[in-house]
Image (cartoon, grey):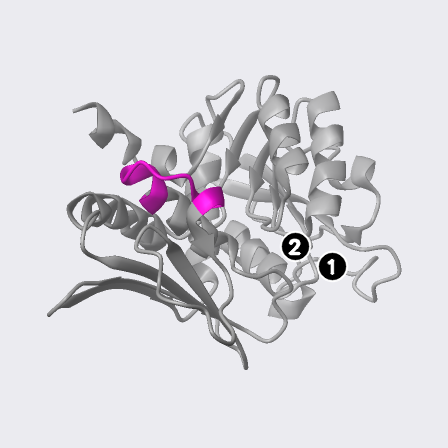
Amino acid sequence: MTNLTKTGSNGIPLKITIAGASGRMGQMLIEAVNSAFDAQLSGALGVAGHDAVGQDASAFSGKLSGVLVTSDLSVALANAEILIDFTRPEGTLKHLEYCVEHNIKMIIGTTGFDEVGKKAIAAAAKKIAIVFAPNMSVGVNVTMKLLELAAQSFSEGYDIEIIEAHHRNKVDAPSGTALKMGEVIAGAIGRDLNEVAVYSREGITGERDPSSIGFATIRGGDIVGDHTVMFAGIGERVEISHKSSSRVTYANGSLRAARFLRDKPYGLFDMQDVIGLRRLDSK
């Protein structure tokens, strides 16, 4: 059963519901919450018709939590302070509407949103607190800061390419993390990623536009997530890489984000805020 002796900074554990409870990321998040000293699993949201619905959310680990997987939002979120959502854009936006109506904070790790979806999240953040990031890994977000600093030095005379690799089941490409890396780099050197991004090359393409930022996507096997940014100049090449060997880094980062949101009534934040890197920009 859930450990009722857990306590947060105010003596009360954070009550967290996990969306996509039957998926690999959802199970990793459930295990992280169950292991945390200051968090308590309050609900588990699954897809209607899935075998996991009606089963204990922690059954996969061999340790029962007493929380059943449900496809009913009102049941899954009945006691929740925070919903952690790593699902699909259409599902996350549906959950977002409910959370706004019931003043439940959100951590959104879902990727693949279009501009309309991103605007909906930004609008919701005027009413509830949201951490929205394409990658919750602390390591990835430190890498983002390194890329920002590197791009400022390599803004002229260096070609920029972003290479990412993920497992065969990932449905969006390039990855949200790769796109965010592109946005960070473009912003650091005064370019608009929408205008300079190159997502595919085939046939006779002509010489490379020196202002472009290229993307290459690899899908295969069970690769959790590899990202490399190449700054290729004449006579030298600098590569900055991050490689994930386990989804536990995303789960741990999500819990860190949950703790960050505890005292936030509303607002849109990302992992740069959570781990304190945003403060470096003001120094």
The residue at the far bottom in this view is: 221
**Residue underneath mark 1:** 56
Q: Residue at x 37, y 53 (%)?
A: 212
Magenta span: chief secondary structure: helix
Which amino acid type is shown beneath numbered disc 2? Ser
Q: Residue at x 15, y 46 (%)?
A: 153
- Could you say which is closer to the camera, residue 233 or residue 9? 233
Q: Is 198 displayed left or right of 84 in the figure? A: left
- Could you say which is closer to the camera, residue 136 or residue 227? 227
**Residue underneath mark 2:** 65
Q: Which region is colored magenta?
A: 185-195
- Does the CB distance between marks 1 and 2 fall below 8 Å? yes
Packing grade of label 2 (10 A; few <14, some 14-19, many >=20) is: some
Above or below, 32 relative to 14: below
Above or below, 226 relative to 145: below
- Could you say which is closer to the camera, residue 137 or residue 103? 137
Q: CA distance from mark 1 to mark 2?
A: 7 Å
- Could you say which is closer to the camera, residue 184 or residue 20? 184
Q: Residue at x 51, y 74 (%)?
A: 202
Residue 42 appears at what percent x and percent y? 66, 41
The disc, 1 or 2, on the residue closer to the chain's N-terminal end is 1
Packing grade of label 1 (10 A; few <14, some 14-19, many >=20) is: some
Which amino acid type is shown beneath numbered disc 1? Asp
Above or below, 186 relative to 222: above
- Asked whether the viewer can see residue 211, the reply is yes
Q: Is 227 displayed left or right of 35 in the figure? A: left
Residue 231 appears at what percent x and percent y? 24, 60
